[in-house]
């Protein structure tokens, strides 16, 4: 058992190191980029990967490697903001519902039921479609659906804990609502929320890329991974590198964050 | 206890299997009813009916109905070789006899057509003037677009003589009657049959039709114009250009059109494929808002014209560099003077001269302290990326002369265009859908006209466009249109980027295919398979 | 059986409420749209209306009434099955949906079946033969499969299977062969994720005290597995799989667009391009309805299986 724990810790360290590396790359990658990601070069249109251009160039002769480095910044930033906002909102709403119970609980839970009735990215597609494409609307639409699962988790745990003997005893002992929240409930809920959030990073990144791919999120000429894939579609045969590089970037990022999520779960989850 | 639970698990498993069966069941049902109306599936694989000549076509669009009078559905009917009109357009976009063998104008408002003798509908019924009259009247009745081509006063039928009277003089009547909207269709057929299997006069007859999916055609045994090259045709909608490319490569399709120019390189092997390319009537254009905003000032518009390297853009998307609004497929599009050749120094000098300078050093010039940043709308088009490429290229070039451009992809481009709420806006206009220049001009460049998106206005041009209506000689029409086009260009109204090649790709065993400038025609009687 | 009936009844009641909420939310989102319905109606028909005509049309369409009244009117029609008319094609939304829905259901349904048939055996086998070479291979593959964006998988599958190997058709929608690639693209990433989840669930169950107890009592491994571990581990997975139907329906939008599949997802993407609000509305609502019912079915199914829940209520 102890070995397992140690192994999980070790994996966590490794995944964390990889994730930190990626985040640093995303944050400072633009200074490493050999070219301006927006610089059009008609002399090097669709150049294959080589010494000049590490990952080749796209239809306007822009350096794909540089675009990926720049794109990392916005992809990461958006994903983290989304995960942070949705998880915090979700936890806050869930706690409110779970602790207050009664009418508030019912109203909030029914609202969540309604939101959860929209499958997958359908709601985001519709909102982006109706309000107009653009990163803001898409993010808004995704966030609107995404927070609900945190709220559900938190609410269920909170209402379960609320009725536990030791909480009731603590109440008899004169502990206030805030005190109970801080001392007993949050410490139980936070690890679960953190696990969920770290497992969510990859999924969120893919959802955003998918909507970009449909042309619903990013606007050209912004270097965004999903949109780069969208642009590359037509040239799958004539310039496959246009498709491979951004896809691989998404793949690697999602793998690292999935590993991180798994490791976080193994370390934090008392079950294992 | 244990066995009870076991039973429950089994029960559940059975239920799961059942529900899955139901789910897939709707699929299974669908499949059978499709295969029943679908014998020629086998011919696709070349198994059944040996000796029959069968062609598989991948088209970018198969309409929701085949009724020529609905929306643009007639275009599909014409492309697949089923529908024909009184007159058709030849490879120079000039009118040529089809169902009408001669025509003449008897006065300003009257045109008389002689319907070819011996033409019959595919059901054997003879085509006379009366049949043509009801088809044309039906088009005017059902489709608002008909009125854009000319205002119909009356149609008279007498034996093989068809007389069309217009409410106003219109020199474009012969060209405009080539629009597949005016397909001669047997109006005695039931309305329902009109949607799914209209009776026309073309070399092929619709055998079965699956809306927005496929059409199956067979040879018209009653065809009037000589032998027909094929026995059966299957036309499928493959909306995505890449999928069409792959369908050609994998051999699923023998003929396709409108594939992305970059991908033509994949079909260079002449032993396997034939490629046909011709400049069509389409122009890639960026509308500039002449009415409001920064671009109201002609100097900024001129600077953008000088400052954008249109030759390079055209090369990039494999088109022909545009000069004026009409493409070189038309006589009126040739021999224009390019008033604003690529010259960034001139652009900068022009801006400096008019006091647009960058005082705060951010690389963007200002007007009265405000950065010149233009909103450039483009469609979020999922099929072709030409518009996006042009937009990004224009943006990059404009930045070099100190003009900022912000790109906005919008789905509701039509709305943005007609509400004039843009600075720049990309479009891909068919400037002479019927080979005649008039309709496009009066809709797009007449002061206050409904499609005058850029709010262009020039009294002289207005006068000339009106004059065009009552010019009847075809060559004169073209040369007047050329003059108008030059004037609009000199005013710096729009950024004309490139003329677009239309293309058709076939496998090498397909013979006598052709790329017409006007894309009403894809399948002709001549196409055959060796 | 009575318990069962009241459970289903309760769920159905809940469902009515949820559907009500779904329609209301969808309606609000549409109403908040920046474009004007009356104008879109004409523009999508390719002509620019005059101001008077617009005013008249708004009046006719009742666009001036308060939101709730409009919603009430819309809901009344919707209950009668009238979801309005598509702006762009003039077709009834319901007709259009009816035409395109089977395509999506066929795709999602087949993908679902494939996923189930991949996920359960592989998930269970890898758990049983933990740390065998097969376990490692499957884990490795699923790990990657789990992290690949589905549209990327689609592009690569298309490139390799259709273009390079020419095994499958790119065009055509009604034969089995052309279904292979979209179904694979939809099913594989999901199957990867479920294989991992099932494996984890079975392993966890295997380490429970009662299992260890049973083993100590000399119950055979096989029997423990089939009678105890699997039922307990797999019940929660079924609920999850119901949820994954949502993923399949949503993901279909991208996959259908790539493979030019005539389904409801590609219809939605087209509708978005045309700002065809009634169609988008119809799409969202139908998706939600289907999803809600699938989930209900999954829940009822689990309820049937789960003795604790049944007795507990």
Image: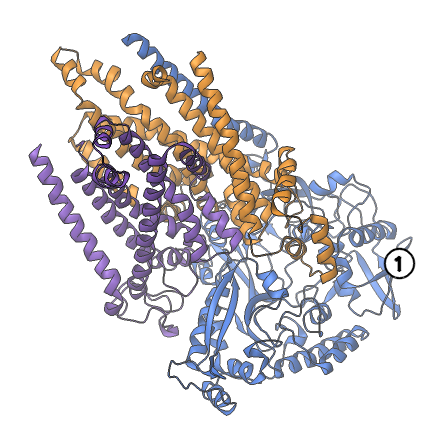
Residue drawn at 80 percent across, 42 percent down: B124
Comparing B144 with B266, the one in front is B144
Residue at the spot of label 1: B154
Comparing B516 with B27, the one in front is B27
Query: Is C135 situated above or below B233?
Result: above
Question: The N terminus of chain A is located in which quarter?
Answer: top left
Residue drawn at 41 percent across, 36 percent down: A104
Query: Is B379 situated above or below C86?
Result: below
Query: Is B16 situated above or below C90?
Result: above
- Residue C249 is left or right of residue C129, and the answer is right
- Residue C292 is left or right of residue B323, and the answer is left
Residue C129: x, y in percent?
18, 26
* Chain B, colour shown: blue
- Extreme residue in the right direction: B158
Residue C33: x, y in percent?
55, 53
For the colour orange, the matching chain is: C
- Residue B45 is left or right of residue A48, and the answer is right
């Amino acid at each position: 058992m102890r070995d397992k724990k140690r192994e999980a810790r070790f994996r966590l360290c490794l995944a964390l190191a990889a994730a930190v590396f990626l985040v640093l790359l995303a944050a400072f990658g633009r200074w490493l980029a050999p070219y301006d990601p927006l610089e059009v070069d008609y002399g090097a249109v669709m150049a294959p990967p080589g010494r000049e251009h590490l990952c080749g160039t796209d239809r306007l002769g822009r350096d794909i490697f540089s675009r990926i480095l720049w794109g990392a910044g916005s992809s990461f930033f958006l994903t983290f903001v989304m995960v942070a906002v949705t998880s915090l909102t979700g936890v806050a709403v869930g706690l409110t519902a779970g602790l207050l119970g009664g009418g508030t609980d019912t109203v909030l839970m029914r609202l969540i039921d309604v939101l959860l009735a929209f499958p997958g990215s359908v709601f985001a597609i519709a909102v982006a479609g109706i309000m107009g494409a653009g990163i803001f609307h898409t993010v808004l639409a995704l966030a609107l659906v995404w927070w609900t699962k945190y709220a559900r988790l938190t609410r269920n745990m909170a209402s379960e804990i609320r009725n536990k003997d030791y909480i009731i005893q603590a109440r008899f002992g004169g502990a206030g609502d805030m005190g109970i929240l801080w001392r007993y409930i949050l410490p139980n809920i936070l690890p679960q929320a953190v696990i969920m959030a770290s497992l969510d990073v990859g999924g969120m990144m893919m959802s955003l890329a998918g909507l970009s791919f449909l042309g619903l999120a990013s606007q050209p000429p912004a270097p965004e991974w999903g949109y780069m894939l969208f642009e590359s579609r037509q040239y799958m045969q004539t310039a496959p590198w246009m498709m491979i590089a951004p896809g691989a970037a998404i793949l690697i990022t999602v793998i690292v964050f999935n590993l991180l999520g798994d490791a976080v779960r193994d370390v934090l989850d008392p079950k294992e | 206890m244990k066995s009870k639970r076991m039973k429950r698990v089994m029960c559940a498993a059975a239920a799961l299997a059942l529900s899955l069966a139901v789910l897939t069941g709707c699929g299974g049902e669908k499949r059978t009813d499709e295969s029943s109306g679908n014998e020629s599936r086998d011919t696709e694989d070349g198994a059944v009916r040996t000796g029959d000549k069968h062609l598989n076509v991948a088209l970018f669009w198969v309409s929701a109905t085949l009724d020529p009078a609905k929306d643009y559905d007639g275009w599909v009917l014409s492309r697949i070789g089923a529908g024909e009109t009184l007159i058709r357009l030849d490879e120079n976009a000039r009118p040529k006899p089809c169902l009408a063998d001669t025509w003449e104008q008897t006065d300003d408002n009257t045109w008389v057509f002689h319907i070819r003798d011996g033409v019959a509908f595919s059901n054997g019924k003879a085509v006379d003037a009366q049949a043509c009259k009801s088809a044309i009247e039906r088009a005017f009745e059902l489709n608002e677009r008909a009125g854009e081509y000319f205002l119909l006063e009356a149609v008279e039928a007498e034996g093989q003589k068809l007389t069309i009277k217009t409410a106003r003089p219109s020199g474009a009547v012969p060209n405009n009657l080539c629009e597949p909207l005016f397909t001669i269709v047997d109006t005695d057929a039931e309305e329902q049959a009109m949607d799914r299997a209209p009776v026309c006069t073309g070399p092929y007859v619709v055998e079965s039709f699956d809306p927005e999916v496929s059409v199956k055609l067979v040879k018209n045994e009653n065809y009037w114009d000589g032998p027909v090259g094929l026995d059966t045709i299957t036309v499928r909608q493959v909306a995505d250009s890449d999928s069409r490319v792959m369908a050609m490569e994998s051999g699923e399709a023998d003929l396709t059109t409108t594939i992305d120019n970059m991908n033509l390189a994949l079909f260079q092997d002449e032993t396997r494929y034939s490629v046909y390319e011709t400049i069509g009537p389409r122009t890639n254009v960026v509308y500039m808002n002449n009415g409001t905003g920064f671009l109201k000032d002609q100097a900024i518009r001129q600077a953008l014209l000088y400052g954008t390297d249109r030759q390079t853009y055209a090369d990039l998307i494999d088109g022909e560099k545009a000069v004026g609004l009409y493409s070189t497929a038309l006589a009126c599009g040739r021999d224009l003077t390019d008033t604003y050749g690529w010259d960034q120094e001139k652009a900068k000098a022009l801006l400096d001269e008019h006091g647009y300078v960058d005082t705060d050093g951010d690389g963007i010039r200002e007007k009265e302290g405000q950065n010149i940043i233009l909103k450039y709308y483009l469609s979020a088009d999922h099929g072709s990326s030409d518009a996006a490429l042009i937009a990004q290229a224009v943006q990059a070039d404009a930045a070099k002369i100190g003009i900022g451009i912000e790109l906005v992809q919008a789905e509701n481009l039509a709305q943005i265009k007609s509400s004039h709420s843009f600075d720049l806006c990309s479009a891909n206009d068919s400037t002479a859908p019927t080979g005649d220049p008039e309709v496009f001009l009066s809709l797009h460049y007449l002061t206050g006209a409904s499609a005058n998106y850029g709010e262009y206005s020039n009294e002289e041009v207005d006068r000339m466009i009106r004059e065009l209506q009552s010019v009847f000689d075809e060559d004169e029409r073209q040369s007047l249109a050329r003059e108008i086009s030059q004037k609009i260009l000199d005013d710096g109204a729009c950024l004309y980027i490139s003329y677009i090649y239309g293309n058709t790709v076939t496998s090498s065993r397909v013979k006598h295919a052709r790329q017409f400038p006007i894309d009403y025609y894809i399948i002709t009687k001549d196409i055959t398979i060796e | 059986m009575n318990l069962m009936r009241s459970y289903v009844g309760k769920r159905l009641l809940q469902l009515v409420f949820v559907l009500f909420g779904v329609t209301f939310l969808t309606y609000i989102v549409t109403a908040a749209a920046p474009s004007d319905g009356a104008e879109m109606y004409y523009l999508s028909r390719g002509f620019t209306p005059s101001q008077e005509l617009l005013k008249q049309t708004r009046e006719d369409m009742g666009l001036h009434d308060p939101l709730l009244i409009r919603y009430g009117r819309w809901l009344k029609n919707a209950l009668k099955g009238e979801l309005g008319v598509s702006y762009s094609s003039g077709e009834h939304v319901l007709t259009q949906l009816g035409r395109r829905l089977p395509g999506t259901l066929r795709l999602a349904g087949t993908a679902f079946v494939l996923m189930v048939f991949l996920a359960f055996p592989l998930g269970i086998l890898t758990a049983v033969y933990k740390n065998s070479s097969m376990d490692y291979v499957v884990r490795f593959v699923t790990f990657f499969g789990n992290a690949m964006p589905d549209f990327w998988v689609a592009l690569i599958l298309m490139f390799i299977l259709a273009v390079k190997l020419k095994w499958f058709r790119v065009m055509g929608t009604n034969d089995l062969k052309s279904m292979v690639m979209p179904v694979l693209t939809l099913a594989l990433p999901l199957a990867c994720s479920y294989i991992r989840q099932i494996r984890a669930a079975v392993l966890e169950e295997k380490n429970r005290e009662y299992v260890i107890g049973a083993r100590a009592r000399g119950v055979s491994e096989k029997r423990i597995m089939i009678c105890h571990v699997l039922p307990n581990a797999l019940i929660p997975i079924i609920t999850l799989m119901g949820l994954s139907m949502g993923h399949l329906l949503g993901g279909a939008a991208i996959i259908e667009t790539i493979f030019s599949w005539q389904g409801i997802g590609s219809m939605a993407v087209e509708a978005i391009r045309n700002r065809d609000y009634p169609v988008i509305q119809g799409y969202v609502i139908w998706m939600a309805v289907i999803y809600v019912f699938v989930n209900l079915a999954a829940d009822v199914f689990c309820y049937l299986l789960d003795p604790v829940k049944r007795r507990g209520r």
